Structures are given as structure tokens and as C-alpha cells.
Image: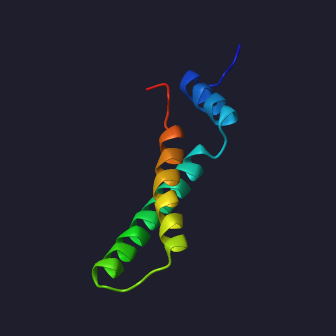
Amino acid sequence: MSKIDPELKKKLLRETKAPFKGLRRLIWAACTGSAFLGIFIMGSKILAGNEIEMNNLLIQIAACLLFPTLFFFERDKSN
């Protein structure tokens, strides 16, 4: 029959259903870290008494909500 190892076959089938999943998870993790770093820096500027534009703050808050959500939905549901 098939000379492919069953574990390799399962891995290949998972990859065909969700290509580049590892790369997407890495991108979501990097964007999440960047968003939280940005909100930390903006928060420190606010605490220092500097004024910031409200649009920029709202964008950072949205990014802090969006990217971890995307990272969460990329998890492996079989575990």
C-alpha cells in the first residue's frame, strides 16, 4: 500500500488543510508583542504628562484586542 509513515501522513494532511499555520502564528505573536509594547509606551507618555492623539491610542487598543484574538483562533484544536 502506502510507504509513507502514518505520522508523516497526518502531518502532511494537517498542513494541506491549514498551510503556513506556523508562520501565521509567528506573525500574530510578533504583532501582539508590538501592540502591547506600543500601548505600554503610550501609557508611559500619558503618565509623564505628554499629550497623545486619541486616534493613535484607539488604534493601539484595537491592535491589543485583535492580534491576541487572531493568535487564539490559530491554536491547534485537536489538543
Considering the image in quadrants, where does the C terminus appear?
top left
How many dots with numbers? 0
Q: How is the image coloured?
A: rainbow
Considering the image in quadrants, where does the N terminus appear?
top right
| Residue drawn where x is 53% and y is 39% of the image | 73
Front position in the image: 30 or 14? 30
- Give the image quarter of residue 47: bottom left
Front position in the image: 68 or 11? 68
- Give the image quarter of residue 45: bottom left
Front position in the image: 52 or 4? 52
Q: Image check: 46 left or right of 19?
A: left
**Vertical position of residue 43 compared to residue 5: above or below:** below
Question: Which residue appears farthest toward the top when viewing the image?
Answer: 1
- Give the image quarter of residue 14: top right
Residue 22 screen position, x and y as percent? 55, 47
| Residue drawn where x is 28% and y is 84% of the image | 48
**Vertical position of residue 58 compared to residue 53: above or below:** above
| Residue drawn where x is 64% and y is 32% of the image | 12
**Vertical position of residue 59 compared to residue 13: above or below:** below
Residue 5 screen position, x and y as percent? 58, 24
| Residue drawn where x is 68% and y is 32% of the image | 17
Front position in the image: 34 or 12? 34
Residue 76 screen position, x and y as percent? 50, 33
